């Protein structure tokens, strides 16, 4: 398990592209600068989607792990 503290959790398990990204954007928009979102997803496409979204928006993809088909992302708002 990760020792990264999150300010908000978002469960996108069972959702396919583009829903995890759309829900992540909405959640991050509600955070203050420097706060961290923990997002979980089962769509393997979310790996590349989250990396490119973070790069494009300037938010930091702090961590990505995968366990039993569930991808966990920690995103820090810029």
Image (cartoon, rainbow, N blue to C red):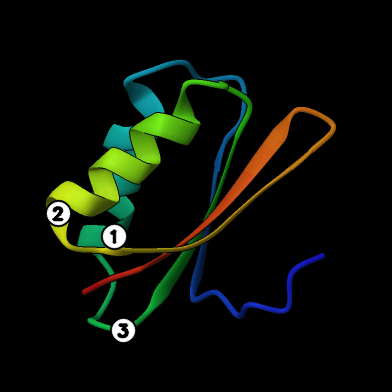
Q: Position of residue 47 (x, y in %)?
A: 49, 34
Q: Secondary structure at mark 2?
A: helix
The reply to whether the C-beta atoms of the residues labelled 2 and 1 are less than 8 Å apart is yes
Q: Please state if 27 lies on the left or on the right of 72 as rendered.
A: left
Q: Position of residue 36 (x, y in %)?
A: 43, 73
The residue that appears at 61% across and 29% down in the rendered structure is 13
Q: Secondary structure at mark 1?
A: helix
Q: Secondary structure at mark 3?
A: loop
Observer-nearest of 29 and 62: 62
Choose top left, top right, bottom left or bottom right for residue 2.
bottom right
Q: How many marks?
A: 3
Residue 28 badge: 1
31 in relation to 61, above or below: below
Choose top left, top right, bottom left or bottom right for residue 43.
top right
**Residue ID for mark 3:** 34
Quadrant of image for the N terminus: bottom right
Outermost top residue: 16
**Residue ID for mark 2:** 57
Q: Nearer the viewer, mark 2 or mark 3?
A: 2
Q: CA distance from mark 2 to mark 1?
A: 11 Å
Residue 65 badge: none
In primary-sequence order, the first of circles 2 and 1 is 1
In primary-sequence order, the first of circles 2 and 3 is 3
Observer-nearest of 17 and 66: 66
Q: Nearer the viewer, mark 3 or mark 1?
A: 3
Q: CA distance from mark 2 to mark 3?
A: 14 Å
In primary-sequence order, the first of circles 3 and 1 is 1
The residue that appears at 25% across and 80% down in the rendered structure is 32
């Amino acid at each position: 398990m990760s020792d990264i503290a999150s300010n908000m959790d978002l469960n996108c398990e069972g959702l396919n592209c583009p829903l995890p990204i759309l829900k992540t954007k909405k959640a991050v928009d509600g955070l203050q600068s420097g706060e961290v979102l923990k997002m979980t997803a089962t769509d393997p496409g979310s790996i590349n989607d989250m990396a490119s979204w973070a790069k494009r928006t300037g938010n930091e993809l702090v961590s990505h792990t995968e366990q039993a088909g569930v991808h966990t992302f920690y995103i820090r708002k810029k």
